[in-house]
Image (cartoon, helix red, strand yellow):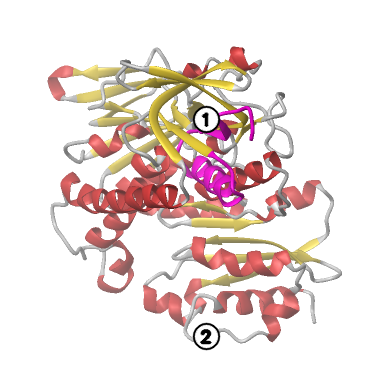
């Protein structure tokens, strides 16, 4: 028997923590998960991925956005959509997902404690009851930190949860505004900006960078910008916010930019990134230190500088996706417990749930150019595909990047309806080193969006004069 109370302590019950705990339990190990909030699931289930994506689906349905290409811009399933209409669906999904996760942990005989965790030493963690009435110390051979993040809040911004909001406050809005300013054009900021714009809200995006999402293919971003502007979104790029001032009499906020411009809106969403939720962990007691954004540095196996302590998920930074966090948790648990595992991190897909959604796997054209990789491009527009016309999406785009000589597939970039589902076909072909011949010779169901792959492959081959 081990001298430790548990084989593994997992701090945090979000996607990364869940997968780490379940993987360890599947290997026959004694596992405890500490969650400091009253419900399990972390940011993903309670304020982030699940509620925001459910909110997005409710917006697309109730606003009739998907069908406007067929029935006109005035088409809507429901007039005068309220915040209650949107959160009704989110509440239902959140309750169901929390129950699913709780059942998975119980079924795998994982202990779950509702407590705030902090290090006493590198192998000992103190569990403090959330109400502060009791505490106990628990030891483990290995520890996984999966505490996730919190919305970054600059001290000079007057957050009040009503007019000046962080992304964590969105679900608690009582009414939908007529105008909104979104400060920060990262993934979260753009997802919410496009969501509110689809509802007819006048949105202004402010970001100090000259280009949106530099890690995404430039042509895909150009397409997104076109869609946003079609929905009356105003872009203020290359601009920095100097201050935000509530206008009490008019129930608005005035945003002062460093350039001297002023933007007035009913609500301001301040979304300039997220900070690792590590402040209460007492990392120094475990010989660890977080960076200025609360994030932990890890090696290839998600080990921190203390070899038996691992960190996974959003707390280690990019790409900060639920899907990648789950895999990181699984891989960390396997490595900690000496179990064989294999994974291909360079083929992890990225999904961005703007309206329209974006998904990609593999390098961008800019990256391939920097690496001096000779490539060609094959494209398929949804308007060329029967299913695109049926779905009412005539502006979607699928791009294939492939090697100029061998025709081996290098990357897939998609914007449009179902992008985050469609990308997995390309991901599978990339995983077995397939070439454009696979798409040229394959038969896809008709009518489907998957046909875009065949159309794009022919387009790419034709560019070569073959």
**Quarter placement of the N terminus:** top right
Residue 132 locus on image (x, y percent): 33, 16
Residue 262 locus on image (x, y percent): 34, 23
Q: Is residue 242 visible?
A: no
Q: Is 404 one of the magenta-colored residues?
A: no
Secondary structure of the residue carrying tag 2 is loop
**Quarter placement of the C terminus:** bottom right
User: Of callouts 1 and 2, which one flags the residue occurring earlier in the amino acid sequence?
Assistant: 1
Residue density around tag 1, few if under 14, some if 14–19, many if 20 or more, within 10 Å:
few
Identify which residue is drawn at 23% across, 35% down: 172
Q: Nearer the viewer, residue 322 or 123?
A: 123
Residue 257 locus on image (x, y percent): 41, 21
Is residue 230 depicted above or below 284 in this figure?
A: below
Residue density around tag 2, few if under 14, some if 14–19, many if 20 or more, within 10 Å:
few
According to the picture, the residue beneath numbered tag 1 turns out to be: 238
Q: Residue furthest front?
A: 1
Is residue 97 depicted above or below 66 in this figure?
A: above
The image's mark for residue 124 is none
Residues rendered magenta in the picture: 1-30
Secondary structure of the residue carrying tag 1 is loop
Residue 308 horizontal side relative to residue 171, left or right: right
Residue 335 locus on image (x, y percent): 70, 42
Q: Is residue 35 visible?
A: yes
| Count of numbered marks | 2
Q: Nearer the viewer, residue 135 or 209?
A: 135
Mark 1 against mark 2, which lies toward the viewer? 2
Q: Nearer the viewer, residue 256 or 293?
A: 293
Is residue 137 depicted above or below 365 in this figure?
A: above
According to the picture, the residue beneath numbered tag 2 turns out to be: 445
> Residue 70: which quarter of the image?
bottom left
Q: Is 20 one of the magenta-colored residues?
A: yes
Is residue 296 depicted above or below 71 in this figure?
A: above
């Amino acid at each position: 028997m081990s001298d430790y109370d548990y084989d593994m302590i997992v701090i945090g019950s979000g996607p990364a923590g869940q997968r780490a705990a379940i993987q360890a339990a599947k290997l026959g190990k004694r596992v405890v998960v500490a969650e400091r909030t009253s419900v399990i699931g972390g940011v993903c289930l309670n304020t982030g991925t699940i509620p925001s994506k459910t909110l997005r689906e409710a917006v697309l349905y109730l606003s009739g956005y998907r069908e406007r290409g067929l029935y006109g811009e005035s088409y809507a399933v429901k007039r005068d959509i309220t915040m209650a209409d949107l959160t009704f669906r989110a509440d239902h999904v959140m309750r169901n997902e929390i129950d699913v996760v709780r059942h998975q942990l119980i079924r795998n005989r994982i202990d779950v404690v509702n407590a705030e965790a902090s290090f006493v030493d590198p192998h000992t963690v103190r569990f403090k009851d959330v109400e502060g009435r009791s505490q106990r110390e628990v030891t483990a051979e290995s520890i996984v930190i999966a505490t996730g993040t919190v919305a970054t809040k600059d001290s000079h911004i007057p957050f009040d949860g009503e007019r000046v909001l962080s992304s964590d406050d969105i679900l608690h809005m009582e009414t939908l505004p007529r105008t909104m300013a979104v400060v920060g054009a990262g993934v979260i900021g753009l997802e919410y900006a496009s969501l509110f714009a689809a509802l007819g809200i006048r949105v202004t995006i402010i970001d100090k960078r000259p280009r949106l999402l530099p890690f995404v293919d430039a042509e895909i971003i150009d397409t997104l910008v076109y869609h946003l502007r079609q929905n009356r979104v105003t872009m203020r790029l290359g601009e920095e916010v100097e201050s935000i001032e509530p206008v009490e009499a008019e129930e608005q906020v005035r945003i002062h930019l460093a350039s001297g411009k002023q933007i007035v809106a009913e609500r301001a969403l301040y979304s300039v990134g997220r900070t690792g939720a590590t402040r209460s962990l007492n990392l120094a007691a475990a010989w660890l230190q977080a960076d200025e954004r609360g994030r932990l540095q890890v090696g290839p196996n998600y080990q921190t500088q203390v070899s038996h302590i691992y960190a996974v998920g959003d707390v280690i930074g990019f790409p900060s996706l639920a899907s990648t966090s789950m895999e990181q948790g699984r891989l960390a648990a396997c490595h900690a417990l000496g179990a064989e595992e294999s994974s291909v991190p360079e083929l992890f897909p990225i999904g961005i749930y703007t309206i329209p959604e974006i998904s990609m796997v593999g390098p961008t054209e800019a990256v391939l150019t920097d690496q001096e990789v000779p490539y060609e491009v094959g494209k398929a527009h949804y308007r060329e595909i029967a299913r695109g016309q049926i779905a009412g999406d005539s502006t979607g785009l699928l791009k294939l990047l492939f090697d100029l000589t061998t025709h081996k597939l290098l990357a897939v970039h998609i914007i449009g309806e179902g992008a985050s589902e469609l990308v997995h076909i390309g991901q599978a072909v990339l995983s077995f080193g397939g070439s454009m011949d696979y798409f040229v010779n394959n038969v896809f169901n008709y009518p489907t969006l998957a046909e875009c792959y065949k159309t794009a492959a022919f387009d790419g081959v034709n560019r070569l004069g073959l």
